[in-house]
Amino acid sequence: MTHAEQHALILELRDYARKMKRYDQEEFEMFVKRDTDDEDLDTMSQKKLIRLYEQYIGPMEDGV
């Protein structure tokens, strides 16, 4: 997953941040901070970001 793809997922999830459970919201805020610092996510963090996306938005489509 490229940095641009990570950034796109984070931008889409921002609209759903208030609907997230507390634990998910804290984890998402960490992703936002790492994105702001232009850090690439490791494999585990990428999987967690995808899980959040699929949990709150729906299945990922190709090219997201």
Image: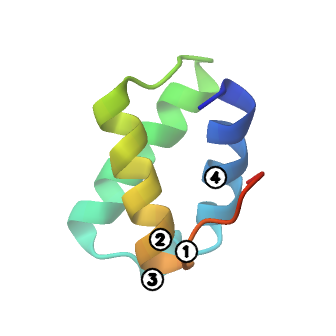
Q: Secondary structure at mark 2?
A: helix
Q: Which residue is mark 4?
A: 9
Between marks 1 and 3, how big is the CA–CA gap?
A: 17 Å
Say what amino acid the circle numbered 2 marks: Glu
Which of pointers 2 and 1 lies earlier in the amino acid sequence?
2
| Residue 24 x/y as whole percent | 30, 63
**What percent of the width, then of the height, locates residue 34?**
49, 27
Residue that mark 3 sits on: 19
Residue 5: percent from left, percent from top: 69, 39
Bin the neighbour count of mark 3 within 10 Å (Cα to Cα): few under 14, some 14-19, many 20 and up. Answer: few
Identify the residue at horizontal 42%, vertical 38% (top origin).
Answer: 46
Question: Which badge, 1 or 3, comes first in the chain's sequence?
Answer: 3
Viewer-side residue, 6 vs 35: 6
What residue is shown with label 2? 54
Marks 2 and 1, how far apart at CA: 5 Å
How packed mark 1 is, by other alpha carbons closer than 10 Å (few <14, some 14-19, many 20 or more), is few
The span from disc 2 to disc 4 (Cα, nearest Å) is 10 Å
- What secondary structure is marked by label 3? helix
Its colouring scheme is rainbow
Circles 2, 1 touching at the beta carbon (< 8 Å): yes
Q: CA distance from mark 2 to mark 3?
A: 14 Å
Tag 2 near tag 4, CB within 8 Å: no
Cα separation, mark 1 vs mark 4, equals 12 Å
